[in-house]
Amino acid sequence: MSRKPVVIGVAGGSGSGKTSVTKSIYESFKGHSILLLEQDYYYKDQGHLPFEERLKTNYDHPLAFDNDLLIEHIQKLLNHEEIAKPVYDYAMHTRSDEFIMVEPKDVIILEGILVLEDERLRNLMDIKLFVDTDADLRIIRRLFRDIKERGRSMDSVIEQYVNVVRPMHNQFIEPTKRYADVIIPEGGHNHVAIDLMVTKIKTILEQKSIL
């Protein structure tokens, strides 16, 4: 009988460094059977809404995500079935017609700001991580990223942070920290915590005779 894959959830606020942590863990298992599943790909399809309505989407709210589809896809991967991962079109604020075929692997890393918010998702995870970074560092990282990579103005980034990102973080993201098995301070810069996490994952995989 095929062994059940290991699912690792990595959560944390925008700019916390969770993507860096995820990449570090992923790179540590390069050459092994591992895949990355980003929650950002699973924003709800809004094709039925007028474009003006789509512009009002709060992407930091739990209701923005199609967790039903995400859970269905994780369960398929756990059953060693291929999935068609959706692609989100941020310019049109809805799901694209494209998709990405993803083959099942022995290790699944699920990364996103709210992956620990839904109990159904938590129940599918073997290890739950929360990347915990101070708010001042998170807003600075977000400023650099959105201005440099997304061509946004400083005023627009700060306005969005104050009116949407910060309140959503305090209301929905920060409380999920209590569900984490491990809290990693300062994100990708915390090499000691990441090394310990990699060692723990390897132990679990060895126990399942995957490595």
Image (cartoon, rainbow, N blue to C red):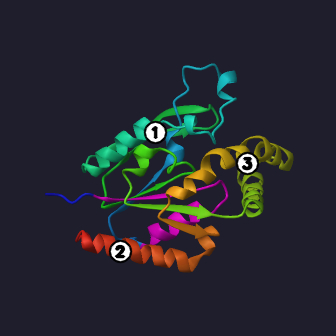
Instruction: Between residue 162 and residue 22, name the one nearer to us.
Output: 162
Residue sitting farthest toward the right: 155
Q: Mark 1 falls on what kind of element?
A: helix
Residue for badge 3: 166
Quarter placement of the C terminus: bottom left
Q: Which residue is drawn at 58% across and 51% down?
A: 113
Residue for badge 2: 202
Q: Quadrant of residue 185?
A: bottom right
Quarter placement of the N terminus: bottom left
- Please state which of the two labelled residues, at mark 2 or mark 3, is closer to the viewer: 3
Q: What stretch is highlighted in magenta?
A: 5-28
Decide: is 53 above or below 129: above
Residue for badge 1: 67
Residue sitting farthest toward the left: 1
Residue 125 in picture, x, y percent from top left: 39, 55
Q: Mark 3 falls on what kind of element?
A: helix
Q: Counting other residues with Cα less than 10 Å from the Cα at mark 1, is it few (<14), some (14-19), or many (20 or more)?
A: some
Q: What's the amino acid at mark 3?
A: Arg
